[in-house]
Amino acid sequence: MEKKMCVGVIGLAMGRHHLKGLVDKNIEVAAICDINPEVLKARGDENGIPEEKRFTDWREMLKIEEMNAVLIITPDQLHKEMSIAFLEAGKHVMCEKPLAIVREDLNAIVAAAEKAKTVFMVGQICRFTPAFVKAKELVDADTIGELYYMESEYAHDYFKILHEWRADPNRHGVVGGGCHAVDLLRWFGGDVKEVFAYGTHTLLPNAPYDDATVAVMKWSDRLMGKVFVSTGCKRPYTMRTQLWGTKGTILCDNTSDTMQLWTLGEDGISVNPDPEIIPIDINNHNVVHEFDVFADHVLNGTPVQMNAVEGAKTVATCMAIVESAKIGKPVTPDYKFN
Ligand SMILES: NC(=O)c1ccc[n+]([C@@H]2O[C@H](COP(=O)([O-])OP(=O)(O)OC[C@H]3O[C@@H](n4cnc5c(N)ncnc54)[C@H](O)[C@@H]3O)[C@@H](O)[C@H]2O)c1
């Protein structure tokens, strides 16, 4: 078991939040890496990282003995090569979502993580977003009874960021960003039995895939749901989410400072007309909580909830949605990764 975290961070765009979180908490930073020297200098200077700990080639970091963990915050297409190399070098790895965007990469990462003796965790950030964490607590405490319907969304305008690696035809909006909403519902409902989806292509004519998709999903004969993904939407980023149970209902999202909870009145049958309004911290990139959980796995050996198979199942569900919209038929997600 490790005594302390000594961490490397690769990819310093989104990864700047992870790096700042480490520095703010006085976690030892062994190395930082970005292929872009200007980004590397800017993030290094602003976080007081000495020159000798800055790298433009991530392979150099494989040799750093004192570094026991690495955070991989690079484009999705690079997750496989980097994850496997660091696992094979005996490092603990936290890799950003989506785990990968093609099935061969999912299979390879799952195999490497199963073989490794170190921790592998996927950074599905919604499992750390305060509103969703609170909703999970309420559902687990049976506050709204048995879930029978759930819905979530990923509405994020990609108009200005749809280039380079995000324009890869395999990086369909449902896989790249929609995986947040799909993973969130999988967190509540577990493995999905079947999906049926429609897509439209109206707002981002240059995108190599649909820019809006709606999927209905079935978990069992008692639980169904819906995910809506829009990567051309004309409203600020949001993930409005609804959880409908036999004893109550929760409405929440990642960008509101309150959530609504309806529960039953004293007769135990009819719902109270007014919801309880629960205050919520807005923090839709809660990388500090996410890192705390990763560190707990590394330092205390707690079981990894968001492991490689879980991350792969979320992507496989997204792939089933994309496939269903393409062929116009229901699809069963393929959760075999070997
Ligand atoms: N959790 C979230 O909410 C969230 C939000 C945004 C992005 N992401 C994920 O984080 C990852 C990075 O996304 P981003 O928005 O920062 O992308 P980005 O394109 O804005 O930045 C990627 C960074 O990685 C660097 N990079 C590229 N290739 C590299 C290499 N070979 N070695 C080292 N550095 C390299 C680039 O120079 C750049 O600074 C992706 O997997 C993305 O899906 C997650």
Image (spheres, helix red, strand yellow):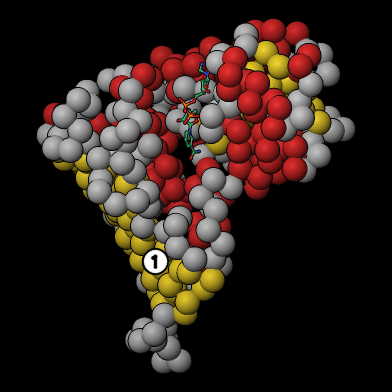
- Residue 260 visible within the image: yes
Q: Nearer the viewer, residue 167 or 85?
A: 167
Q: Is residue 199 above or below residue 100?
A: below
Residue depicted at 81% across the width and 39% down the height: 26
Residue at x-position 28% and y-position 39%: 231
Q: Amino acid at mark 1?
A: Leu
* Quadrant (top left, top right, bottom left, bottom right) of the N terminus: top right
Residue 299 percent across, percent down from the top left: 80, 36
Q: Quadrant of residue 197?
A: top left
- Along the horizontal axis of the image, is 154 left or right of 142? left
Residue farthest along the bottom direction in this orientation: 267
**In this orientation, which residue lies closer to the viewer: 163 or 324?**
163
Q: Position of residue 137 (x, y in %)?
A: 56, 62
Task: Answer left or right for 327 relative to 237.
Answer: left
Q: Is residue 320 visible?
A: no
Q: Is residue 121 above or below residue 31?
A: below
Under circle 1, the secondary element is strand
The residue under the point 72% across, 37% down is 22
| Whether residue 1 is situated above or below residue 287 in the rendered picture | above
Seen from the viewer's position, the closer of residues 293 and 19 is: 19
Coordinates of residue 292 in the picture (x, y in percent): 70, 43
Percent x, y of residue 123: 55, 36
Check disc 1: other Cα within 10 Å, few if <14, some if 14-19, many if 20+: some
- The residue sitting at 65% across, 21% down in the picture is 41
Judge left or right: residue 147 versus residue 289: left
Q: Which residue is mark 1?
A: 251
Could you tell me which quadrant the C terminus lies in? top left
Outermost residue, right side: 3
